[in-house]
Image: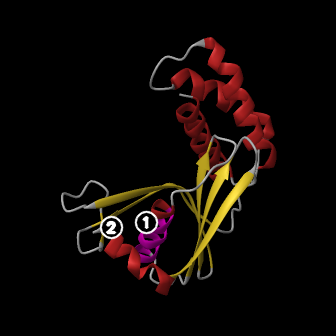
């Protein structure tokens, strides 16, 4: 539950920053936290609120959105069985990836996946799928950095893929 409601906050906060063209905005962060908690899909017990607020503040204090490189928040990428991009709801969609955040700087893509834990081992297959999906959608990308950002500790698990190295991901996927 903490992870779900925190993730909703991360999305709402990033969307606010993008909409207002700010890298950070401490002044409204707490109100977004309160509103997000109140609107969560399932009613939450009050004792969860303090943990939720702590995780959100840990995220906000070090979080700066790079307005020059941000491409999408909750970026949806769907691919057909032939691994061609298609619409998210298209009947031919065979696999879908939702990226918490996608930044592109020249020929480098940075996929950020927010995690509410302290740290852990990233699922390498998930990272490879993200990299493959980005390459299929953005043909000019040559390098993909997939970052698992553990918001409680600030620890980043960063994995770098080159375009030519992700070809084996298709075999694993199939």
Disc ID at residue 129? 1
| Residue 91 in the figure: left or right of residue 153 | left
- Which element is circle 1 on? helix
| Location of the C terminus (image quadrant) | bottom left
Q: Quadrant of residue 109?
A: bottom right
Magenta segment: does it hold 88? no
Task: Give whichever of 108, 174 is nearer the camera.
Answer: 174
Disc ID at residue 142? none
- Residue in the image at 61% along x and 26% along y: 35
Residue under numbered circle 2: 173
Find out whether the residues at labels 2 and 1 contact each other: C-beta distance under 8 Å: yes
Which residue range is magenta in the image? 127-137
Furthest residue in direction front, as rendered = 121
Q: Quadrant of residue 117?
A: top right
Task: Give whichever of 92, 168 is nearer the camera.
Answer: 168
Task: Give whichever of 9, 45 is nearer the camera.
Answer: 45
Q: Quadrant of residue 77?
A: bottom left
Coordinates of residue 26 in the picture (x, y in percent): 80, 39
Note whether 122 is above or below 35 in the view shown: below
- Residue in the image at 63% along x and 44% along y: 16
Tell me the chief SS of the magenta region.
Answer: helix
Note whether 72 is above or below 143 in the view shown: above
Task: Give whichever of 125, 15 is nearer the camera.
Answer: 125
Q: Distance between the residues labelled 2 and 1?
A: 8 Å
- Which element is circle 2 on? helix
């Amino acid at each position: 539950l903490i992870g779900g409601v925190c993730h909703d906050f991360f999305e709402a906060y990033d969307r606010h920053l993008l909409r207002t063209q700010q890298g950070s905005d401490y002044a409204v962060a707490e109100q977004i936290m309160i509103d997000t908690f109140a609107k969560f899909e399932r009613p939450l017990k009050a004792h969860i609120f303090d943990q939720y607020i702590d995780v959100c503040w840990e995220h906000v204090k070090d979080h700066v959105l790079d307005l020059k490189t941000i491409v999408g928040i909750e970026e949806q990428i769907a691919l057909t069985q032939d691994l061609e991009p298609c619409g998210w709801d298209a009947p031919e969609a065979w696999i879908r990836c939702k990226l918490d955040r996608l930044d592109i700087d020249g020929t480098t893509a940075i996929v950020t996946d927010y995690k509410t834990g302290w740290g852990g081992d990233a699922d390498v297959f998930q990272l490879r799928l993200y990299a493959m999906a980005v390459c299929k959608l953005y043909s000019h990308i040559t390098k993909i950095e997939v970052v698992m950002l553990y918001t409680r500790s600030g620890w980043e698990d960063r994995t770098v893929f080159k375009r030519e190295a992700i070809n084996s991901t298709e075999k694993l996927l199939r």
